Image (cartoon, grey):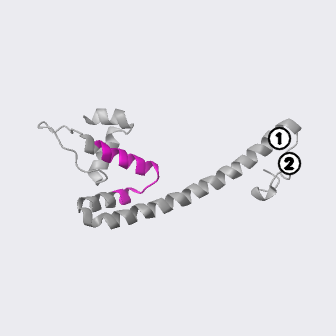
Amino acid sequence: MTINEVSLMTGLSQDTLRYYERVGMIPRVTRTAGGTRNYGEEDIRWVNLAKCMRSAGLPVEVMIEYLELFRQGDDTIPARLELLREQMTVLEEQKRAVEETMERLSFKIDRYEDALVTGRLDWDGKDKDRNTDTKRG
């Protein structure tokens, strides 16, 4: 597949695909005799992994480290596992933070929706401990 086809398939720009390859987030893509990138199935799997990891907030450096460990062979499986576990912990913490923010927003939305019905904004009508903004809302 050409870089254009991979770009269309993955939603990543061609510049992003080139960047991922240049910095070592994905392995070097094989080239045709004319020098055009020719993505194979394995390349696509690496691109999809990089896309997934980046969308989850995984730092570029961690992805590079993961690829370097992969290249070193199966002796690095414990190190790769640890790296992924560490990232899972980071994601779990981020998820908790997002859930807390969503709960707070839900509370505020409920209060404002009630205000539209009653004509009065009341921060004490529900779990007031979830709102630390004072009555200014």
The reply to whether callout 1 and callout 2 are in contact (CB within 8 Å) is yes
| Residue 132 visible in the current orientation | no
Q: Closest to the observer: 46 or 73?
A: 73
Q: What element carries label 1?
A: helix
The residue beneath circle 1 is 114
Which quadrant of the figure has residue 35?
Answer: top left
The residue beneath circle 2 is 122
Magenta residue span: 44-63
Q: Residue at x 83, y 37 (%)?
A: 116
Compared across the picture, whether 35 is left or right of 1 comes to: left
Q: Is residue 130 above or below residue 14?
A: below
Which quadrant of the figure has residue 8?
Answer: top left
**Magenta residues: mostly which secondary structure?**
helix
47 inside magenta stretch: yes
At which x and y percent is residue 107? 75, 49
Compared across the picture, whether 131 is left or right of 18 comes to: right
Q: Residue at x 28, y 54 (%)?
A: 24
Q: Residue furthest left?
A: 33
Gap in Å between the C-alphas at discs 1 and 2? 8 Å
